[in-house]
Image: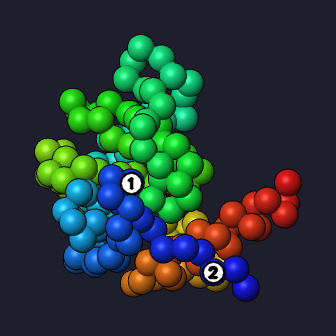
């Protein structure tokens, strides 16, 4: 079994501490330089449209629209991240590990996520129909995605990635 090194701060290289805050897990620099979290965790804190914009920009080639190579290494793998301009804030993104790095105070500058809207009766009925048609496999996948721990969510994500890779 391969043991991965702990994530480190891209500014000071100190080991990051994993912290949970009301369902939002992030790795935090003990010296206060910033925090990192995965793209899947971003859905707990950021608006969906911001996440899509950040990810789209991070996966495009360097251009004049705010995407360029970062000067920082990824907290997880040390590979050079991509710098993305979002709402006037330059974020560092690792497209390999799907990690976002926020310098101290940057995350507070972005609007907080709004709660998902309550499904209408018609939407809930449609969801129930799909659930009935696809059964246990679909609901098991949802349950795995809703694991209360970061490890559970990452395990579910890696399982889906391995299954998709094997099918290719």
- Above or below residue 52? Residue 9 is below
Picture residue at 14% right of the left edge, 51% below the top: 105
| Element at label 1 | loop
Quarter assignment of residue 166 = bottom right
**Are the residues flagged by discs 1 and 2 in contact, CB closer than 8 Å?**
no
| Element at label 2 | loop
Residue situated in front as seen by the camera: 131 or 152: 152
Residue, far top: 64
Q: Please give left or right for residue 9 compared with residue 168 in the image.
A: left
On-image quarter of the N terminus: bottom right
Spot occupied by residue 108 in the image (x, y as percentages of width and height): 14, 52
Spot occupied by residue 57 in the image (x, y as percentages of width and height): 46, 31
Spot occupied by residue 168 in the image (x, y as percentages of width and height): 85, 54
Q: Please give left or right for residue 140 compared with residue 113 in the image.
A: right
Mark 2 neighbour class, 10 Å CA radius: few under 14, some 14 to 19, many 20 or more: few
- Above or below residue 159? Residue 92 is above
1 or 2: tag closer to the N-terminus: 2
Quarter assignment of residue 71 = top left
Asked if residue 69 can be seen in this view, the reply is: yes
Residue situated in front as seen by the camera: 67 or 123: 67
Picture residue at 28% right of the left edge, 78% below the top: 20
Q: In whole angstroms, how far apart are the C-alphas of marks 1 and 2? A: 20 Å
Spot occupied by residue 145 in the image (x, y as percentages of width and height): 50, 74
Quarter assignment of residue 157 = bottom right
Picture residue at 19% right of the left edge, 47% below the top: 106
Residue situated in front as seen by the camera: 33 or 18: 33
Mark 1 neighbour class, 10 Å CA radius: few under 14, some 14 to 19, many 20 or more: many
Q: Please give left or right for residue 80 compared with residue 83 in the image.
A: right
- Above or below residue 2? Residue 107 is above
Picture residue at 43% right of the left edge, 26% below the top: 67
The residue where tag 1 is placed is 10
The residue where tag 2 is placed is 3
């Amino acid at each position: 079994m391969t043991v991965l090194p702990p994530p480190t701060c891209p500014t000071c290289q100190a080991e990051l501490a994993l912290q949970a805050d009301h369902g939002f897990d992030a790795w935090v620099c003990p010296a206060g330089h910033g925090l990192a979290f995965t793209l899947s965790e971003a859905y707990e804190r950021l608006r969906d449209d911001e996440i899509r914009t950040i990810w789209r920009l991070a996966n495009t080639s360097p251009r004049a629209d705010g995407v360029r190579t970062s000067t920082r290494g990824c907290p997880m793998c040390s590979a050079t991240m991509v710098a993305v301009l979002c709402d006037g804030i330059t974020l560092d993104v690792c497209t390999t590990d799907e990690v976002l790095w926020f310098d101290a105070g940057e995350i507070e500058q972005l609007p907080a996520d709004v709660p998902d809207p309550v499904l209408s009766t018609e939407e809930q009925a449609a969801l129930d129909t799909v659930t009935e048609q696809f059964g246990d496999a679909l609901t098991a996948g949802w349950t795995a995605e809703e694991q209360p721990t970061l490890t559970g969510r990452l395990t579910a994500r890696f399982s889906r990635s391995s299954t998709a890779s094997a099918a290719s």
